[in-house]
Image (spheres, rainbow, N blue to C red):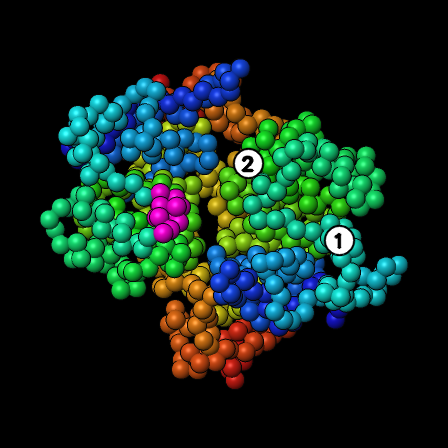
Amino acid sequence: MGEPILSINNLTKTYALGLARRRYVKALDNISFKINKGEFVSLVGESGSGKTTLARIILRLTPPSSGEVIYKGKNVWSLSDEELRWYRKEVQGVFQDPYTSFNPFYKVDRALSVAVKKFLPGEDEHVVIRKVLESVRLNPDEVLGRYPHQLSGGQLQRIAIARALIPRPELLIADEYISMVDMSTRVDIVNLSRDLVDQYKMTIIMITHEMNMALYATDKMIVLFKGRVVEYGDTKKILKDPLHPYTQLMIEALPRIDKNIERKILQKTLDAQKKGLTESVRGCRFAYRCPFATERCFNEDPVLEEIDKDHYVACWLHNRR
Amino acid sequence: MARDIVSKAQDLRLYYILPNNIYVKAVDGVNIEIPRGGFLGLVGESGSGKTTLAEGLLYLIDPPMIKIGGKIFYIRRREGSSTEYETIDLETLPQHRLDQLRGVELSLIPQYAMDALNPTMKIGSFIKDVARYHGRDVDEILNRALERFKLLGLPGDILNRYPHELSGGMRQRTVVGISTLLNPKFLVADEPVSNLDVVQQHIVIDFLTELVEKKIVETLLMVTHDLHLILEKSRYLLLMYGGHIVETGSKEEVWSEPLHPYTKMFLESIPPVGSRIEEKRIRGIPGNPPDLRYPPPGCRFHPRCPFVMDICRRKEPPEIEVRPGRKVKCWLFVDRKV
């Protein structure tokens, strides 16, 4: 595979809360992983897992407290002005709410033409825009000349992806980009992402709480829980054999038509939550919810370890050291 | 007959007026009978009119929403009788009777429930107000609240807290609890688990299911865009598209033999757990949902339907009752009862 396109090394982000009594919350707690070129990666986590903070740090919207983001060998948070212009072209973001991504007073054409003028000066705006819209499977005649409120969430999100593709980026960070799209068209956005990866060798990081879509389409999965990576690796391996009880919980919780599915971990978690036990202060953050937790889990932090080729887990159940 | 149905709408039309006198036809000629008892689902995507219909069934009609036509009935057991039922036309009820009915027999868990609490009141004070307004014993209701909050995984000191001291997920569960305090007979829950994490989703759905199973709530109508959420617990489904009810039936019937092309394609657009894109590519529904300001003529789904016929473009399809309780609004089923 060679050099990874993106390396996250020991990344931590601490937020201070409260004025009189200051408390510190670790949104990200010593996170590390690597992503190769041409991979479709899912970063799965629920609210409070730190997934959006991570996206913002990669996109240079929020500085980290410590640790590094290395893109093509360069530390993203210490780029020169010229390198920064290059980075802003190479790495693009698509965000959750397509209705706030566009200025409601302008036709959507403007967002696209601004991007062409900025990133591809001298190229024929008209041609670029039509081509890029076609690449996200929109009919340019149906969307051009329209205002955001005249388009559906799915159409707007495709235009947002099209806009992000104009600089011909290598890495696309998609933060919950399907959660506001209609259920019946979500899968098409995910299919489209898969095709962008397969056809143009793009690298896409899909940040989502939808385990189902992540399992369906991505090559690699990173599971975040309370600011930590609990499991990471080949999605097919995780689908076949999820190792961390939290990953198992997320898969177990997915709705099924057959009622008889046994939800052991979910049941334990529900019991814990009803007792008000949700988070461990020391050790594994998931210990209180975990049906397999031992004394050690409540006291010692588990370390992320490669259990099988391309399959890492941070759990004392699987740790061999 | 009446005992089998809890709520009924006849040719109901609920529109929104925009400032420039354009109408959004959110509910446009809906005829439904909501069966009495159990966990039911009203499923539709954004802009299908499901929230408008849900509010309409409780006669929560306030500008800019207006009723253009049709009737809304609530069918209840006659007081003092265990066998007789009365059908109430909610429109003819004076406001104070409607207010009495709501909360006591009818209740709504509103969409965006986490923002539904009064920020200046402690949760406990709010509950006391609810109890007093409906002439209930305050202590009894407070105790019941504590019990329910416990089932919802909320902390024991919640009555003394202000909404801003709670997380979004906690506020949402609080509103779910409060909406059920007077043991409503007919509870409409509008997206009660959106924005919750999977564990909290299961807590809320299990809680509501328990109330239904214990017959504390007789009929629960859960409104959702996420069919999967209610797949396990619901017994009956109503599917909505473009301001119309397009299909109704038991969950098993709808799941195993969807009739309307929309339902069929909707069910097929969600990857089954464990499926992989290389093995089988799941397809969404092509096209876009209708703009309810200018809905297409004929069937609202015809621009996206692979089985479209000439008549679909011209005339609104009738509702065909394939079996009792099993209806579909589609030209494909005219003169071709299955």
Left or right side of A196 for B77: right
Q: Quadrant of the N terminus of chain B?
A: bottom right
CA separation in Å, label 2 and label 1 = 28 Å
Q: Position of residue A304 (x, y in %)?
A: 35, 24
Left or right side of A283 for B200: right
Numbered circle sitting on residue B99: 1
Q: Could you say which quadrant of the image residue B285 lies in? A: bottom left
Q: Could you say which quadrant of the image residue B171 lies in? A: top right
Q: Residue at x 73, y 63 (%)?
A: B90
Q: Residue at x 37, y 58 (%)?
A: A151
Q: Position of residue B15 (x, y in %)?
A: 56, 64
A96 drawn magenta = yes
Circle 2 residue: B168
Farthest residue toward the left?
A122
Q: Position of residue B9 (x, y in %)?
A: 65, 68
Q: Residues within 10 Å of mark 2 (few under 14, many from 20)?
A: some
The earlier-in-sequence mark between 2 and 1 is 1
Farthest residue toward the bottom?
B335
- Three-letter code for the amino acid on which mark 2 is drawn: Gly
Q: Is residue B323 above or below residue B73?
A: below
Q: Secondary structure at mark 1?
A: helix
